[in-house]
Every structure is written in C-alpha cells, then in structure tokens.
Amino acid sequence: MAQSLFEELKRRNVFKATTAYLVLAWVVIQVTAEAVPALGLPEWVNTLVFFLGALGLPFVILFSWAFELTPEGVKKEADVDRSQSIASNTGQKLNYVIILLLVVAIGLLLLDKKPSEIPATTVDNSATNAAISTKASIAVLPFVNMSNDAEQEFFSDGITEELLNVLAKISEFEVASRTSSFKFKGSQEQIPQIAQNLNVRYIVEGSVRKAGDTIRITAQLIDSTNDRHLWSDTFDRPLTVDNVFVIQDEISKSIVRALSTELGLAKAITVQATQTTDNLTAYELFLKARTILQSRTRFAEVESLLEEAIKQDPNYADAWALAAVNYTLTTYYVSDHALSSKELLAKSDDYAKKAISLDPDSANAYAVLGLNLSTSYISMGLVPWEEVFDNYEKAIKLNPNNPQALNWYAVATMTLGYLDRAFKLLNQCVAAEPFYSSCHANILWIHGALGDDKAAIKYYEDLLNIGGASIIGYAPIHSFARLDMAILFKYHATVSDGLGDWPYHAELYLAHRNIDKDHSALLAKALSFLDGKQFSNAVISNLKKRALLMPLGYFEINPLQFTWDPVYIKYRKSKQFKEFVKTTGILDYWQTAGFPKQCQPVGDDDFICD
C-alpha cells in the first residue's frame, strides 16, 4: 500500500509541485530580504513573507493531490478519466519550471557571493554586519566645517555635540559618546568601518556652512550595514540663534522618525532640542569655549570667552556652569593665574550656584560643586563628605552618562578607600565614554591598589591597542616595578616631567622593588635635583612626584586617591596620614558610613590601615 501511495503521489505530480513551490518560495524570500532595506520597509516584512510562504506549503500539497490541470482547466482529480489524463505532460512542464527556478536561485547565490564593487578602501559589509549592533545604536560624526573661515570649525563641532546630546537623552537609542565619535574627526575610513569601530549600526554625518547672515546645515542618516541612506535633508536659514535650535530640533526629530520606521518601533518617541539662549553671539562664544576646554588647554582663553558670553546673556545657565568648571580646572592645570586657588574655587562655587538658580537641572554645576567641596582636602581643610556625594548623586541622576561627573565621583570615593564602589563608577564612565582617559587611568590605579598587577598591565596593554592610553603619566608604574618589568618602569620614570634627565633611575627602580628599606638618601638627591625646576604640565608632574617619591618617604604631599596602593604602605603608617584622615573629616565619615575594607577603627578616635 505504501508503494502504491508513493506511485500515486508521483503520478499526481505532488513531489514536483512541492519542489517547485519550495524553490519559488526561497527565491521570493531572498528577493524580499534585498528589497526591504532598499525600499525602506520595516524589518517585519521579511517575517511576514516567510510566514506566508510556510502557510502556503500545505495548500500546494493538498491542491496538487486533489486537482489536476486539464485542457479544459482545473478539475478534481477524481473527475478526470485516466485515459484522458495529461498528468505526465504537466509533470514535464513542472520539470522546466523547477529548472528555471533553480537557475534563478543559483544566480542569486552567486550574486550574493560576488565581491563588492565598492572601492577597495571600503570595508566588506558582510564582515562588518556581524560585529555591528542591530539595536538602535547610533553615532553622530563631527559635522564638516564648509565655511570659508577655518576658525568656524568650533561652530560645526558645537552643532554636532548639541545634536548628540539631544539624541543621547532618548532611552530607546544607544548613542556613541562624544569622545568616541570625535576620535574619527577628519577620518578617511569608510562608514562601515567607523560603525564597526564604534559598535553602532547607524551613522549621522553632515556639514555646516556659515556665510554672512545665512547658515546651511546638511545632515544624513546612514545604515552602515548596507550604506543605505535612511534620511537626508538640507536646511537653509537666516543665521539666528532661534533657527540654529530649530534646525537641531528638526534634524533630531527626523532621525527619530526614520529609525522608528526602520525598526518598527510602536512606541512614540518624544524628542526636543531645548533652546538654552536667545543670543547668537553668546551661543557661539559658548560653543567655542566648550570645544577648547575639551582639550584641557588654553584656560585663560576659555575664561575670556565665557565671561563675554555671560555678559551677552546674563541668563545663560550653560555658560555659567561651564565657566565654573573652567575656574576649577584652572586650579589643577595653571600655576600663574592672577587669582589664588582658593579665590578661583570660590568663584567657581558662585558661578555653579548661579547656573543652578537659572537651571535646576544643570548636571555640570552640581558636579563641579562636589569637586570644589572635595578639593579642600588637598589643603587639609575639613570636607563635608556627605554633601560632596550628594552633589555628585544629583549630577549623575540628571545625566547618568556624564563622564566628568562619574570620574570626579569615583576619585572622591577612591580617596576615602571605597575601591569597589569607585570601580563600579569608573566602569560606568568608560561604558559611556570608551576613550575617556582619566577614567581609564583610575581603573589602572584601582587594579594596582587591589594587588592585581597582572590585571593592571593587561588593562594598560588593551588601552595601548586601541590608542586609549594617551596620557603617559597614567601608566601603572608601581605594577611594572612589582612584576620586575624594569625597562617599562624606567621608561615611564624617565619621560616624567622633571626627573627625565636625573642620573639615578637604576637606584630608583631598586628602591621601588624594596620599599620596606630606608631610601632617605636617594630621596634627598631627587628633591635637590627637582628644586627650582619648571614643569610644563602641573597635573602630570605632581602625579609623577607622588608616584615616584612618596614610596621613598616623601610625605609632604598627599597621594590623593592613590593612597591605597601597596607601595604607599609607609605613608599609611605615618603620622601625616593619620593627621590627614582626621583633619579632612574622613575619619568622621568612616565612623558614620563604615570603614573601607583595608582600615579598622581603634578605640573611639583612632584607626589603622593596612
């Protein structure tokens, strides 16, 4: 019976009809897969076509069994005289159909395997697709300055950053950080390669042209997996601050609409570019100051630009907040300002509070207030640590991806010895800004402080691989010494600001290998050599002085957040350290919030740290 059923299935062309249908369905699915992105259709169209194809298969099988094609048309198989049946002819025709469909299918396969006709500099998309996130991941590349004046580049950079900030507030999107995106400024790499490096799928790029009283901004949204333009537009407007913000709003809304359609997002996404000033001059001054301050240089110029911006618009909260940040950073990087560090910090406080009065949601203002409060410990002042952390918490709540606030918060937490908590904040920082070197540097120090020197070296090597270890002063120099990596230790010690041409680096290395011994004679030589020297970078020189000389017994300065590395064991046992902890309010905070793992209370007013 089974044999007769098989023969009957063959006679009625059920096998051939099913084969033809399956090949046809495969061809349709492949064509749809190519057509959906090209026509801008949502991804669910592919699923629908596959579902319909699968749904049709049982109908084809039943139809070919129950019906037969005759010269008079389609008839029930039971009504056809076997002697008049042309099933064999129909079967032959089905053979031709199958062959034709197979040729088409093979052609599609060969076409899919064909090398890309894009120029050789372009990365093969098929390789890129596997590494690119398929979520709504997006990067905003620096808009190109098309103005005749090269000085206007700050304006195009500023527009880019403003747009990035708007998109970053959308929870449904994963937006690459400013530091990461700007790493590709002026890059000749193709879009797919940049997207792969940034681990995003969608790229926004554009240009800005200022000419007299007009502005032209061009922007486009690209799907990097196939170089398809999902949206593009050009905005020509009179150059007014209102129009600049309107264009930013239109671009961001257009991007949201395009991605919502592309990804089939059912939820309506609200986006709004907030106008922060109604004064074009103030806005341009702010953009220029912000761009310069990113480089941590030219603080006097930034100060001048922001003071003029505030003069142009006294209600410009962002300018007040950025000026506060600049005044605080000046105390770290500049040694010859007309104002003392104390006066600069007081001015920074006033500006931050003014910013908050104008905009209660100013994350930068809260962050700098936290930094200013914690900075007082450097001069052995009493620090209200609870208020410090409260300001940082407010800043991060307002902007969870603010790397500056996260890093400052982590540094304060490290200073008090809560290394696990600091490590979590720093990882949050580098997740938001993968190329934010300060957070990477502090992660290196925490690895060392926790005694995991191999992890510190591995982390540093990974940073070197991606070009992320740009500040040479932040190398894990103590880990180099403990792992007997003499050449790396000496290299980083000799390139330090101040000790580069000191002739005792062999002795310095041995001292760091044997920190339990007396190195007072070597310390005296180093201090004598450094006496009267000028340093090109105060921050790096102070870091190196702490890193290289404190293990020798130089306790006149505090190692700040680096206190907890094993190399500073002598300092942690010193009277200077106890005085520092008690005078700055750290002991009071420990007694309330809990001691870090490496410290224990001794009586009511003392402690000991390993």
Image: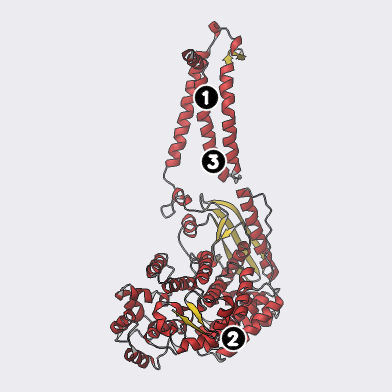
Q: CA distance from mark 3 to mark 1?
A: 22 Å
Q: Position of residue 3 (x, y in %)?
A: 46, 14
Question: What is the three-letter code of the residue carrying label 1?
Answer: Thr
Q: Is residue 300 visible?
A: no
User: Which mark, residue 473?
Assistant: none
* Frontmost residue, 363 versus 482: 482
Frontmost of labels 3 and 1 is 1
- The residue lying at 46 percent from left, 29 percent from top is 102
Residue furthest out toward the front: 603
Q: Which residue is mark 2?
A: 345
Say whether marks 3 and 1 touch (CB < 8 Å): no
Q: Residue at x 36, y 93 (%)?
A: 528
Picture quarter with the C terminus: bottom left
Q: Closer to the N terminus: mark 2 or mark 3?
A: 3
Residue behind mark 1: 18
Residue located beneath label 3 in the image:
33
Judging from the image, what secondary structure is the residue with disc 3 in? helix
Q: Are marks 1 and 2 in contact (CB under 8 Å)?
A: no
Amino acid under disc 2: Leu
- Coordinates of residue 572 in the picture (x, y in percent): 44, 83
- Per the model, the C-alpha gap separating discs 2 and 3 is 60 Å
Circles 2 and 3: CB distance less than 8 Å? Answer: no
Q: Quadrant of residue 305?
A: bottom right
Residue 233, visible in the rendered structure: yes
102 sits left or right of 223 in the view: left
